[in-house]
Image (cartoon, rainbow, N blue to C red):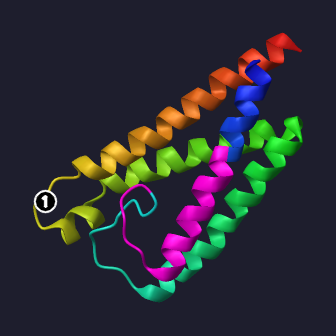
Amino acid sequence: MNSKILNLSLWAGVAYFCCMAVAHFFGLKYPLVFVYYDVPFHAYQDKIISFAVVAYICLFYTAATIRAAVPAALVALSVTVLGLSAVNLSDALQSVLAGRPTTMYWAQTGLIAGYLAWLVVLHIRAKADA
């Protein structure tokens, strides 16, 4: 059962990253698919991000179809959470926020971290079931 839930959860990641890639490509600045949705941006940077997100799509697709790839997806997502946390704490972000809070960015980072934790638990349980 854990393996099935893990598989569905990985496919959910594929769908999420597809939405994120589309949002960045077209400049659709909505929370959850565009973490820093209300800060100045350059369209060419978001196009680059959209192409880079394709790597996540491929990684999560591979993890959903080849169980041995799950640890790589977990590592990539872990680095993402750490990276977003570093950005949230950075002076560079503070300089463009002009005193506005980072609450929404932390909430989104927390949701991604929660998804990561969910995947880790399911991966451990699926391995125990095997």
Q: Quadrant of residue 1?
A: top right
Report the magenta residues as a range. 12-32
Image position of 33 with respect to 52: above or below = above
Residue where numbered disc 1 is placed: 100
Q: Give the image location of residue 40, x and y in percent.
A: 29, 78
**On-image quarter of the C terminus:** top right
Vertical placement of residue 46 versus 99, above or below: below
x 77%, y 27%: residue:
4
Q: Which residue is at 57% across, 35% downward?
A: 116
Q: Position of residue 84 (x, y in %)?
A: 43, 52
| Mark 1 element type | loop
* Vertical side of 15 occupied by 81: above or below: above
Q: Considering depth in this image, is 35 or 23 the residue closer to the camera?
A: 23
| For residue 20, side relative to residue 98 (left or right) | right
- The three-letter code of the residue at mark 1 reads Arg
Is 9 part of what is drawn in magenta?
no
Residue 124 picture quarter: top right
- In the image, residue 101 lies at what x, y percent? 16, 53
Q: In this rendered view, identify the residue nearer to me: 52 or 79.
A: 52
The residue furthest top is 128
Is 45 situated left or right of 69 in this image?
left
